[in-house]
Amino acid sequence: MGDVRTTESVAWLAQSAVWEAPEAIVVTDPEGIIRLWNRGAERVFGHSEAEAVGQSLDLIIPEKLRERHWEGYRKTMATGQTRYGDTPLNVPATHRDGHRLSIEFSVALLRDDAGRTVGISAIMRDVSDRRKAEQELRTRLAEVEQRLARESQMQVTVDEDKCCGAGQCALLAPTVFDQRDDDGTVVLLNAAPDRSEHTAVQQAADRCPSAAIRVSRSA
Ligand code: SF4
């Protein structure tokens, strides 16, 4: 960054604030050439200011994304409009050592006194750790949901020959068990009860004096 050190100068304060910011602050010109690269950018992307300034923004854009990026960049320069303003977005980026970063960024268009767009300032933050943690959380959540879904598949069978007609099952889970009018033998109404009924069905099986009820859960 430059050598201006007039401490009372607002320009120097602004310059220092940009240079020292923990976020990566990068300014590119209309051709996408890097014109400003602060200390945060050095830390996030691994390139020094001397290495980055004067280079194309391709320095940090993964190769597969470059075509789409430049299409949007040219359009922004031509129209003076960007949809990446207020709401931070996530994009992949490339570190100097080649590893992939997940970057959250927002941009501001820089205009001259005549209102012409003369560059883009991007403020970027490395959110790789957060994204990784979110992905791990989503994976674990999906596993739990799958396990719950598997456990929720209950199958019930009854052995009428064993049933002594005591009727506890029909009292505990009346939507799943009933009894024949003539001899009280169990009648199975629902062999795959809803999850909300699993506890009652399990209690009915546990308390059945004849062990006539079998409950299984699909693995
Ligand atoms: S609790 Fe057991 S013995 Fe009693 S009615 Fe139900 S199945 Fe038959």
Image (tube, rainbow, N blue to C red):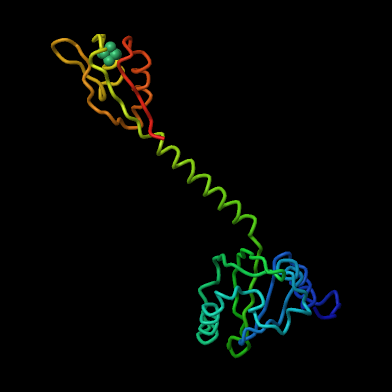
Inspect this view and state whether residue 47 appears.
Answer: yes
Nearer-the-camera pick, 70 or 209: 209
**Residue at horizontal 40%, vertical 37%?**
150
Q: Position of residue 126 (x, y in %)?
A: 66, 63
Q: Position of residue 61 (x, y in %)?
A: 61, 74
Residue 83 higher or lower than 206, as above or below: below
Nearer-the-camera pick, 130 or 63: 63
The residue most toward the front is: 161
Q: Quadrant location of residue 93? A: bottom right
- Relative to 56, 191 lies left or right: left
Ligand 1 lies in quarter: top left
**Residue at horizontal 79%, vertical 72%?**
16
Q: Position of residue 197 (x, y in %)?
A: 33, 27
- Relative to 187, 72 lies left or right: right
The number of numbered badges drawn on the structure is: 0
Nearer-the-camera pick, 208 or 31: 208
The residue most toward the left is: 182
Q: Quadrant location of residue 4? A: bottom right
Q: Quadrant location of residue 31? A: bottom right
Residue 162 higher or lower than 37, as above or below: above
Inspect this view and state whether residue 168 appears.
Answer: no
Screen quadrant of the C terminus: top left
Screen quadrant of the N terminus: bottom right
**Residue at horizontal 60%, vertical 54%?**
132
Q: Position of residue 80 (x, y in %)?
A: 53, 83
**Residue at horizontal 32%, vertical 32%?**
194
